[in-house]
Image (cartoon, rainbow, N blue to C red):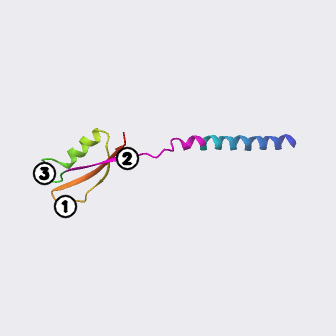
Amino acid sequence: MKSKLSLKVFCVGVLAGVIAVLSIGAVGDVAPRQWEYRVVQGAVFGQEGRLEDAMNKSAADGWEFVSASPSLERYGFAVMKRQKQ
């Protein structure tokens, strides 16, 4: 009976150790990220100076889409972000 109790204590200890190691590893990089933002603009309707082209060009340079204006007008804008360099 004493060996079973020791086995249970051993298993609980191992489980606690695994949880501790995984918790420490999950923390990782705790420094807050800093972002820079860009507003791109262009035509929503039509083929000249399109907003879509401006967004694609920014995305190719590493910018991520955040939001766009709900525009019913001819022109609109989009907000893009990327990690500060």
Per the rendering, the mark at residue 35 is 2
Q: Quadrant of the C terminus?
A: top left
Distance CA(mark 2)–CA(mark 3):
32 Å
Q: Nearer the viewer, mark 1 or mark 2?
A: 2
* Residue receiving disc 1: 72
Q: Magenta segment range? A: 24-41
At 51% from the left and 44% from the top, the residue drawn is 30
Per the rendering, the mark at residue 46 is 3
> Element type at marker 3?
loop
> Element type at marker 2?
strand
**Residue 63: percent from left, percent from top:** 31, 43
Of callouts 1 and 3, the N-terminal one:
3
At 40% from the left and 46% from the top, the residue drawn is 34
Q: Quadrant of residue 15?
A: top right
- Residue 78 shown left or right of residue 49 in the figure: right
Q: Nearer the viewer, mark 2 or mark 3?
A: 2
